[in-house]
Image (cartoon, rainbow, N blue to C red):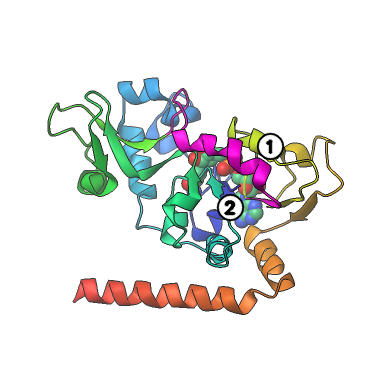
Amino acid sequence: MAGAGISTPSGIPDFRSPGSGLYDNLQQYDLPYAEAIFEIDYFHHNPRPFFALAKELYPGNYQPNLTHYFVRLLQDKGQLLRMYTQNIDGLERLAGIPPERLVEAHGTFATATCTVCRRTYEGQDLRLDVMNGTVPKCPTCKGVVKPDIVFFGEELPHNFFKYIRDFPLADLLIIMGTSLEVEPFASLAGAVRSSVPRLLINRDSVGPFTWGTLRPTDVTQLGDVVSGVGALAQEIGWTQELEALMAQVNRRQKNKNNSSAS
Ligand code: CNA
């Protein structure tokens, strides 16, 4: 289970870290209150603040870091049952975690839907408008096209409910970079069998790790998530493979950038 804290090392602010978090830095969008940026009623009234944020978060501006590649390595070794993420930055996909192994519980910029006629679009179809600061409109009905990000008051994607089958099958739950404050996602932490170890890698203790409902098999690694995941990789002898994987993906990325520039 992951949240915004795994992407702060890539340069994307989280919501709730005092000072650097998004909620403390929304003055430029002139919102009535911070959460309005993700409220569907406010979006219908004024979609511009959301699209200003979308321009910033749109896939392409940021790169995955060691935490994303660690999950990719779990997948390469056949040990990833599923990654449940609250993030909407697409860095899991960029790190090469296959979409079928991912539950993007709060949605994705990879696809979009017209708010009026419900026609669906690829995220790429909106890129030009988003980057130009234009609110994307449906070519057919002229309704506003909204990236498939889950707003407050909207239903979670269907595949979120895979958790009903997945969580009882897990034999280890790793929780990284989340305040575990947003439901129903947060409650997934309690959905593994009671004998299953839960490892929290986060700057601060959160959710059931603080309420005094700790299980004997729970483990907490407090501090920076990259250091915590790095320490875990070292402990299990994966450091070299992880570095090789990151170097390989970076090389591919560079070659791709060079060939698209020439
Ligand atoms: P949050 O509530 O902002 O909590 C983030 C947690 O991560 C906090 O406990 C921080 O202390 C911790 N943290 C931040 N940086 C680090 C770090 N470098 N090392 C270790 N711990 C760190 O974010 P949640 O994901 O829990 O909240 C859910 C919201 C945030 C979801 O709806 C997301 O869509 C939304 N969000 C996503 C992104 C993104 O996609 N990158 C960015 C901002 C917000």
Dot 1 crowding, Cα within 10 Å, few <14, some 14–19, many 20+: some
The answer to whether one can see residue 105 in this image is yes
- Residue 111 or residue 102, whichever sits in front: 102
Dot 2 crowding, Cα within 10 Å, few <14, some 14–19, many 20+: some
Residue 73 tag number: none
Q: Is residue 180 left or right of residue 255?
A: right
Residue 26 in percent (x, y) is at 46, 37
Label 2–label 1 contact, CB within 8 A: no
At 53% across and 60% down in the image, what residue appears? 68
Numbered-mark total: 2
Q: In this view, does 198 lie to the left or right of 160?
A: right
The answer to whether one can see residue 202 in this image is no
Residue 43 in percent (x, y) is at 35, 26
What residue type is disc 1 on?
Answer: Ala
The stretch in magenta equals 150-176
Give the residue at mark 1: 191
Is 162 part of what is drawn in magenta? yes
Q: Quadrant of ligand 1?
A: top right
Q: Is residue 140 above or below residue 5?
A: above
Give the residue at mark 2: 81
